Image: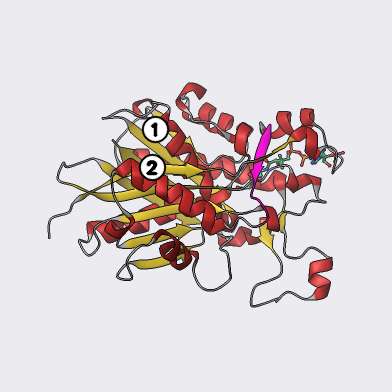
Amino acid sequence: MPTRSTVILGTGSYAPERVLTNAELSTKVDTSDEWILSRSGIRERRIAAPGEAMSDMAVAASRRALENAGLKATDIDLIVVATMTADLPMPAAACIIQHKLGVSSNAACFDINAACSGFVYALDTACAMISSGRYQKALVIGAEKLSPIVDWQDRTTCVLFGDGAGAVVIGTSDQPNIGLLGTKLGAFGDSVDLLYISHGGSSSPTTPESIAARGHCMKMKGKEVFKLAVRVMDEAARDILEQHQLRADQISLVIPHQANLRIIEAISQYLELPMERFFVNVDRYGNTSAASIPIALDEARRSGRIKPGDVNLLVAFGAGLTYGSALIRW
Ligand code: UT7
């Protein structure tokens, strides 16, 4: 079977209405707009409404992606959802999203948890399944409702995260050498303790005591994550460029995981690529984990920053610590 180019046919994103500003956060924990902005570049983040599920946000983003692709839900035969905040521990969010969207029961549906790198992992997986010829049209979603797993009493983490969703529709093209050109995925499992949730998994189920100790919330060694993130993102970017014999200056736009503006600025310096070539929206959404790259990708496309022939570099890192980079030619 000939290898087919796997291409993005449409993109969509969704952010909940409720805006939580740094000023408002400063009334809840001992922090300030000045500290948050100077250390992270974040001005505000979105918070899902109490009854608004992660799957609702994913469905809203997916409808926009389908509309953008000119396709219907019934055209989809594969749903891959990158998330660490599925509505329920079981079943997969992809099945709930399938039902809400009206996607056929012939579609394969599953979730991937690679934390903030999840969307790059999901994109790679879906594109491999599409290029095999066994699937025709995929919805690849990155969606997170992080607000219930943020420790709102811990100023070192609560200022960083937000909720949101992004989605892309994947299909094929006969045109060679476009779409997803390649990916580089990896993980440093020896660094699990830098960013994790201690309770609620099978090794330490939730107890009344663990809830009181906020063991269901994210814990992070911020400084160490920061250092590793810069090194790993730089390496993942260089590896994929080298693999495809491209120079950094041939990348029209880098779409990095939006965790911290200072991390993005460091990558810009290391790659010797000006900040104008980096898409940044961390100021408006904070870190939305697996949703951050697909939201940024959608905003970049809709604001005219991606044109036919352009090559984009996606690069991410997250809990695990996972990392991933991808090259896309439009
Ligand atoms: O997707 C992966 C997710 N994680 C990340 O990307 C996080 C990566 N790490 C970071 O982004 C940064 O390390 C942070 C933004 C989390 C922190 O920035 P930092 O420059 O590394 O600050 P720090 O942790 O060294 O803290 C400096 C000071 C400390 O006070 P002392 O010990 O110097 O007196 C903190 O207690 O700032 C204090 N601090 C705060 N002050 C006001 C920590 N959080 C806050 C806060 N408001 N929210």
In this picture, residue 280 sits left or right of residue 241? right
Q: Determine whether, in the image, residue 168 is placed left or right of residue 154.
A: left
Residue at the image point whose x is 57% and y is 62% from the top: 189
Local packing at callout 1 (Cα closer than 10 Å; few below 14, some 14-19, many 20+) is some
User: Looking at mark 2, is its residue's CB closer than 8 Å to ligand 1?
Assistant: no
Q: Where, by quadrant of the figure, is residue 100 drawn?
A: bottom left
For residue 249, say whether it is visible: yes
Q: What residue is pinned by disc 2?
A: 11
Which amino acid, by three-letter code, is at mark 2? Thr
Where does residue 91 sit, x and y in percent of width and height? 51, 73
Q: Position of residue 111 (x, y in %)?
A: 46, 64
| In the depicted structure, whether residue 142 falls above or below residue 96 | above
Number of numbered labels in the structure image: 2
| Residue 170, image x, y percentages | 31, 50
The part of the image, by quadrant, that contains residue 261 is top right
Residue type at mark 1?
Answer: Arg
User: In the picture, which quadrant includes the C terminus?
Assistant: top left
Q: Is residue 183 above or below residue 129?
A: above
Q: Please tell me which residue lies in front, 171 or 39.
A: 171
Answer with the quadrant where ligand 1 appears in the image. Answer: top right
**Crowding at label 2, few (<14), some or many (≥20) Cα neighbours within 10 Å?**
many
Mark 1 touching mark 2, by CB under 8 A?
yes
Q: Nearer the viewer, residue 56 or 193?
A: 56
Residue at 36% in and 54% down: 139
**Where are the magenta residues, as a range?**
43-50
Residue sticking out furthest to the left: 1
| Residue 221 drawn above or below residue 212 | above
The residue indicated by pointer 1 is 301
**Residue 60 against residue 251 in the figure, above or below:** below
Please say whether residue 259 is one of the residues in the magenta stretch: no
